Amino acid sequence: MAGPQRLNAGRQALLEALKDAGVQFVVIGGVAIASHGEEYRTQDIDLIPERSPENLQRLADMLNRWGCRLVIDPQDRSQDVPLPAGYFTARNLGQQDVWNLATPYGLLDLPFTPAGFPDGYTQLVGRARTIQVAETTVEAPVAALIDVEHSKRTANRPKDLEYLNTVGRREAPRAPDPQHDQLRRLHQAAFPDPPARTSPESQSSPAHHPSRSQSQAQYREGYRHSR
């Protein structure tokens, strides 16, 4: 687990500004992992914006106010591309799958369709939790760790695989099977563990338990439909 946090002043200011402007988003990527208490170092912050025109316009207004530059190569910042004043609009923001930007507060990635989640925000917000974002005092919606790691597996980049190997979660957890779970519950109701034997007189046959017979019939019918 991660040790004591240091304050990232740029990240703090960026999140505070977006929240004050009413921009809705979910934190994903390395910062989300660190926010859940895992060790993960990253230079940028990944935010998935909610895609309504009103929200994208609020985001566009902030990006224009900041005078953002387009990042071509995070390892070679001399290639950053300055953008014209007022460049961002709700429309052009939503036309791209991802924006890699340099702000006065640090690097900001806006992946509208992160790996493994083609519908972006709507797929992630349901399981996101509002918690303290790593290296800040700001609380914001952070994607569930299981979703962030699923995205890392799907992206399959070397740094993603290095993290997954380190935490021992390279393989995806087995997805729950609702039909299997229902059959298991029906089976338990139909064929419960027998009670401890006391005497022959205390034992009874299934015919004396109409509810158990009904459960057995439901189990067999459910199994037949699952085949």
Image (cartoon, helix red, strand yellow):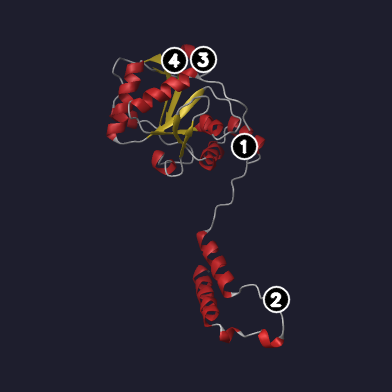
From this view, report whether residue 23 is shown above or below residue 10.
Answer: below
Query: Closer to the N terminus: mark 1 or mark 3?
Result: 3
Q: Label 4 near label 2: C-beta < 8 Å?
A: no
Residue most extreme to the bottom: 201
At a point 55% along the width and 67% down the height, the residue shown is 185
**Residue bearing mark 3:** 76
Q: CA distance from mark 3 to mark 4?
A: 8 Å
Residue type at mark 3?
Asp
Query: Closer to the N terminus: mark 2 or mark 4?
Result: 4
From this view, report whether residue 60 is shown above or below residue 169.
Answer: above
Query: Closer to the N terminus: mark 1 or mark 2?
Result: 1
Query: Closer to the N terminus: mark 4 or mark 1?
Result: 4
**Residue bearing mark 2:** 196
> Residue 80, labelled with which disc?
4
Residue type at mark 2?
Ala
Specify whether 197 is left or right of 19: right
What crowding class fits label 1: few (fewer than 14 Cα within 10 Å), some (14-19), or many (20 or more)?
Answer: some
> Residue 164, labelled with which disc?
1
Q: Position of residue 224 (x, y in %)?
A: 52, 73
Q: CA distance from mark 4 to mark 1?
A: 31 Å
Q: Secondary structure at mark 4?
A: loop
Residue type at mark 1?
Leu
Specify whether 148 is left or right of 1: left
Q: Position of residue 46 (x, y in %)?
A: 46, 29
Q: Position of residue 226 (x, y in %)?
A: 51, 68
Q: Nearer the viewer, mark 2 or mark 3?
A: 2
Q: Label 2 near label 1: C-beta < 8 Å?
A: no
